[in-house]
Amino acid sequence: QVQLVESGGGLVQAGGSLRLSCAASGSILRINPMGWFRQAPGKQRELVARITSGGSTNYADSVKGRFTISRDNAKNTVYLQMNSLKPEDTAVYYCNAQLNQYVEVWGQGTLVTVSS
């Protein structure tokens, strides 16, 4: 079963940018979709962005126009480019892979902190 490892989180000032990476231990070519979720303290985990094997994307309304999800199948990696960051984007960000109808895999998460 594929394993996911996120990286790229950190502390950034409001208005800044970060790029998160999600490296998979195996091929992601047929994983559909892959996505990024986040969980802020005291809140439920929520979808941030998803990308299908064909490259179609969808985003949470709160991040549209600021975040971009992409995938590099050759590198077995999914990215989340985050621009114009806001304090409310502070959360642990998790990578997700929907292996099939019944099985999904999560990474361990990477913390993003946006200071005002």
Image: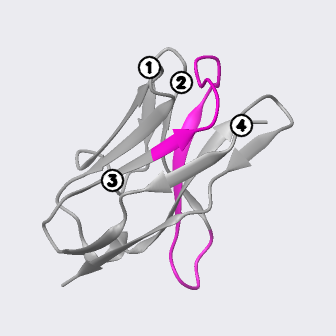
| Rendered residue at 49%/45% (across/down) | 22
The residue sitting at 55% across, 63% down in the picture is: 109
Label 1 sits on residue: 55
Q: Which residues are magenta?
A: 22-44
Per the image, the residue denoted by label 3 is 63
Badge 1 or badge 3: first in the primary sequence: 1
Judge depth for marks 2 and 4 and give the one in front: 4
Callout 2–callout 4 Cβ contact below 8 Å: no
Residues 81 and 4: in front is: 4
Q: Nearer the viewer, mark 4 or mark 1?
A: 4
Type of residue at label 2?
Thr
Q: Mark 2 and 1 residues: CB-CB less than 8 Å, in contact? A: yes
Tell me which corner region of the image, top left, top right, bottom left or bottom right, holds residue 102.
top right
Q: Residues within 10 Å of mark 4 (few under 14, many from 20)?
A: some
User: Residue at the top extreme?
Assistant: 54
Q: Amino acid at mark 4?
A: Val
| Numbered marks: total | 4
Q: Give the vertical position of 102 relative to 14 (above or below).
A: above
Q: Check if mark 3's residue and mark 4's residue have beta carbons within 8 Å.
A: no
Left/right placement of residue 16 relative to residue 78 reads left
Helix, strand or loop at mark 4: loop
Classed neighbour count for the residue bearing mark 2: other residues with Cα under 10 Å, few (<14), some (14–19), many (≥20): some
Whole-percent x and y of residue 70?
A: 37, 32
> Mark 2 highlights which residue?
52
The residues bearing labels 3 and 4 have C-alpha atoms spaced at a distance of: 28 Å
82 shown above or below 115: above
